[in-house]
Amino acid sequence: MPLIIIIAGIVLLFILISLFKISAFISLLITSFVVGLLNRMEPGTILHSISSGLGETMGSLALIIVFGAMLGKLLEESGAAYQITNRLVDLFGLRRIQFAIMITGFLVGLPMIYNAGFLVLIPLIYALSASTKLPLIYLGLPMCAALSVTHGFLPPHPAPTSIAFLFHADLNKTLLYGMIVTLPTILIAGPWLSRFYTKWNLTPPKGLFVAREFSKEELPSLSASLITALSPIVLMLSGAVIQMAVPASYGENKFLKFISDPTIALFSAVVIGVYLFGIRRKRQMSEVMKSLSDSTASVAMILLIIASGGAFKQVLIDSGTADYIKLMAGGFHMSPILLTWSVAALIRFSIGSATVSCITAAGLMMPLMAGTGVAPELMVIATGAGSLMFSHFNDIGFWMFKEYFNASVKQTFLIWTVMETLIGVLGLLGALILSHLI
């Protein structure tokens, strides 16, 4: 019976989001309440579980997501993303321009949600395509692959960060392992895959996007741009490396644990950005603060969706459904990594949202972690990889790609959907390989 209730809940979630166009946040809350009622929980108990799940998730993630949005806004408004791209192109040259774009997409994608990163970088792709006469898709696919991989695999992105908390995974280790999987995945799903589409004559749509032009005087220095963009990653990775290499030293060093904490790392980057892109360039502090305040609006709904996913998870736990899943899945002769990937991929196909797929799959699979011996950090990567599979009509990323690359629906399936599915498969393979090495 609990399995039937879970399936009914996922079907209800699909109907509410896809058919009735209700927001994922409200749909998850409704589904949580219905699943609780079907499990014969008292309405007051259900409400308590939902509130508890919302509060716990919000408390652990709010600052990380907000600081990430602020950092992304600073990189966008200051022209730092443009500066990094232009200098990378100069460094790599025209023959290796894809790698310059790939690195830029990776750096911009770490603190920014996919949609925001896409909108920041797409004018650069248009400009580079026009100036170099290279096919639009040849330049655009490495960018999309890099943004998508960071969205699915790496903290401090909201989805992998939130499921890392659900799986009780170490964020710094998750970032480190995710980086190992990320490089080959982006190379294959970006530069390598793009070579199959170079003869496709995709052109920017007229009037859809007007690129902002930065004069040379407006752009920040390359050093300031890189310091701001990379500082949170350096801090988080340093903590992960020292924790693995010298565990005793990491445990005793309270200062290192403090500065490598994702919240502090991102906050430090925001402070650095405010100084380098604001105070140092003589911008009014009120103007900078308004910009940072506005940036939080872009992640408000994402934070609510993640929190409602935490509510759904809590209802499953309090209703006893999680224990049933653990008992039932114990009879499956399947790797927990493969199982969580499959569940996330199924929900992604049904719902469309990678974030909702991550949260829901992690809530369902969390009871399986005890006693498996699987590193929770690898469960995070596998869940994120599964959440990128099978993108189609119900995914906003599908339509963004179609419109901004002026592609037909068929072309979008053959490029975007193939790329997302390839990333999902490669992420699974990477997690499985690491599980045998760690």
Image (cartoon, grey):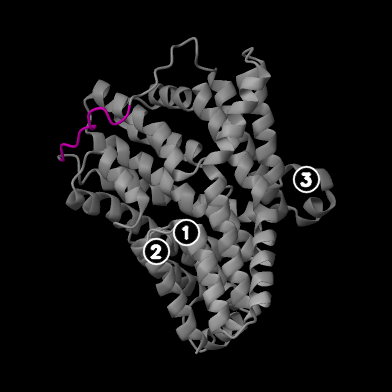
Q: Residue furthest front?
A: 43
Q: Nearer the viewer, mark 2 or mark 3?
A: 2
Q: How many numbered callouts? A: 3
Residue name at image x 41 percent, y 65 percent: 16
Residue name at image x 51 percent, y 25 percent: 77
Q: CA distance from mark 2 to mark 3?
A: 38 Å
Q: Is residue 373 visible?
A: no
**Quarter of the figure with the C terminus:** bottom right
- Callout 2 amino acid: Ile
- Image x and y of residue 320, in percent: 62, 83
State the residue position of label 3.
258
In terms of secondary structure, where does tag 1 sit? Answer: helix
Say the numbered circle drawn on residue 351: 2
Q: Main secondary structure of the magenta part?
A: loop
Up the image or down, 223 lies above or below 141; here it is above
Q: Could you tell whether 173 is left or right of 415 in the image? A: right
Do the residues under discs 2 and 1 have CB atoms within 8 angstroms? yes
In terms of secondary structure, where does tag 3 sit? Answer: helix
- Image x and y of residue 378, in percent: 55, 63
| Label whose residue precedes the other's in the sequence (2 or 1) | 1
State the residue position of label 1.
24
Up the image or down, 371 lies above or below 98; here it is below
In terms of secondary structure, where does tag 2 sit? Answer: helix
Q: Is residue 236 visible?
A: yes
Q: CA distance from mark 2 to mark 1?
A: 9 Å
Residue name at image x 60 percent, y 46 percent: 65
Q: Could you tell whether 391 is left or right of 45 in the image? A: left
Query: What is the crowding at mark 2: few (fewer than 14 residues within 10 Å), some, or many (at least 20)?
Result: many
What residue span does the magenta drawing correspond to? 200-209
